[in-house]
Amino acid sequence: MTLIERTRAVLARAVELYRGTEHERRLQEVRDRLDKPLRVAVAGRIKAGKSTLLNALVGERLAPTDAGECTRIVTWYRDGHTYQVLANQRDGQQRQLRFSRDAGTIEIDLGGLTTDDIHALEVTWPSQALRTATLVDTPGIGSLSEHVAKRTWDMFAAEEQETPADAVLYLMRHLHSQDLDFLRAFHDTEVSRPNPVNAIGILSRADEIGAGRLDAMASARKIATRLATDDKVRRVVQTVVPVAGLLAETAVTLTEEEVRQLRTIGDRTPREVEALLLSADRFVNLMPELGLTSIERQGLLNRFGLFGVRLGSTLLRRGAVSTATDLAKVLAERSGLTDLREVLGSLFFERRDVLKSRSALLAVDALTRSEPVAGSQAVAAEIEEIIASAHPFNELRVLSSVRAGWVTGKPDVVEELEHLIGGTGAATHLRLRLPVDAEPDVLAAAANGALARWQQRAENPLTSHELQMAARVAVRSCEGMLAELRASVR
Ligand SMILES: Nc1nc2c(ncn2[C@@H]2O[C@H](COP(=O)(O)OP(=O)(O)O)[C@@H](O)[C@H]2O)c(=O)[nH]1
Ligand SMILES: [Mg+2]
């Protein structure tokens, strides 16, 4: 039985046990969640660029950014057939809210409710991107008030019976000790501890590094790599990806008019443009002969930032791109969005079943503890069994141990281990460090080679105990890959 099948079986038993009680409905919700898109929360301090990045991932400007009372409420964005906004009230009631969408993002009319009355907003929006993942925008720690911060905290708190999110994107502008404390609190203790498995770090607003110079993203990439190899950071997130969220959002919603305005700037000499782009203030006010009003210039800054204006106009001047479609594509790449999508795919979406099973098992486990009934102990024991023995969880556990520095060995050995158990993505070619188009027989040969090496390590009495345990898991991973390859050849 696969992990997800075992999870379904446990859930079915739990639903039976709690039938007729007030918990039955919640368990059914947990079960239904297994078939729904993965839930990914966007977390981080206020103004880290969370809402902006969420919009970039959806490909539409939905989430309001900056101030506004709705940015203070946890908001779910999910795919659906109709456009709808619901308020989940603290008193348990649900109310449909009116909304408009004139100036881009959705404007929600709270209809007399205050932000304190609302537990969360649920926005349903037909969207291809939201079919893959339901996205959760959070107000952010370090927010306006303790109260708002607490609301974000609730989203992730370990005491909660159910973790509302299966995975989290954690935005950090600077490495801040408070950021790390927050990450730690989010990571539960049940499946592995600490647990970098369901968190990806994002070095956000990356374009602002180095005052928006054209090499800003290269600098950001260096910082992100340094962060990602820092022990403290590795314990809590799988990797760190630099993203210029604003430019990403603009890239996926670029208009012809904006391209025209950038072209106007690109028609000037590089020296003139540089002088103009020294500061936001200069850009808005100097050079009246440019042919763009102050309002248009301010508009460009709001959408692209200084870096984006510089990059976009330069690309057009050099003829590197000529159409809006091409420019949008290059800006998405340069903003880091394309890379982020890839990382999300390999670390979250390909592991969807594991992450969802994990959330579901944690939810049922918490219920059996807080509301025991006859027979719930057996269910709890079974969950413990699954968590202790299911191979995907073992991989996650080893991954956490590697990240925590508990598994030591020669660097290249540890690196191979990390890949084999799916630490850089669950796909077979990633585990074997081969190109995406590697032929099945090449993959099989590599998997066989790895299998032999790791079997040896598992049995070598000189191998440290931790590495031996890890090696056993790696052997299973290799066997799993080989079985899958055999099945795909047939
Ligand atoms: N230059 C730049 N500004 C950004 C970026 N992301 C967000 N911002 C701006 O930062 C402000 C806060 O962004 P927002 O997404 O509302 O942050 P949140 O509070 O974390 O949701 C807004 O004015 C955004 O336009 C970015 O990548 N680069
Ligand atoms: Mg926000």
Image: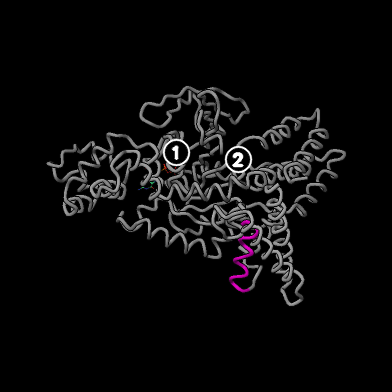
Q: Mark 2 points at which residue?
A: 38
- Closer to the camera in the image, 9 or 231: 9
Residue 386 drawn at (x, y percent) = 77, 49
Q: Name the residue under label 1.
A: 55
Question: Is residue 179 found inside the magenta-colored segment of the image?
Answer: no
Q: In which quarter of the image is ligand 2?
A: top left
The N terminus lies in quadrant? top right
Residue 174 drawn at (x, y percent) = 44, 57
- Closer to the camera in the image, 147 or 235: 235
In terms of secondary structure, where does tag 2 sit? strand
Q: Can residue 250 be seen in this view?
A: yes
Q: Is residue 190 visible?
A: no
The CA distance from mark 1 to mark 2 is 17 Å
Residue 229 drawn at (x, y percent) = 52, 64
* Span colored in magenta: 410-422
- Closer to the camera in the image, 313 or 142: 313
Within 8 Å: ligand 1 and the Cβ of disc 1?
A: yes
466 w.r.t. 426: above or below? below
Say whether residue 275 is left or right of residue 175: left
Within 8 Å: ligand 2 and the Cβ of disc 2?
A: no
In terms of secondary structure, where does tag 1 sit? helix
Q: Quadrant of residue 217?
A: bottom left
Tell which residue pokes out farthest to the left in this image. 289
Residue 197 drawn at (x, y percent) = 62, 53
Task: Identify the main secondary structure in magenta.
Answer: helix
Three-letter amino acid code at the position of disc 2: Leu
288 w.r.t. 475: above or below? above
Q: Residue at x 79, y 35 (%)?
A: 12
Say whether residue 98 is left or right of residue 379: left
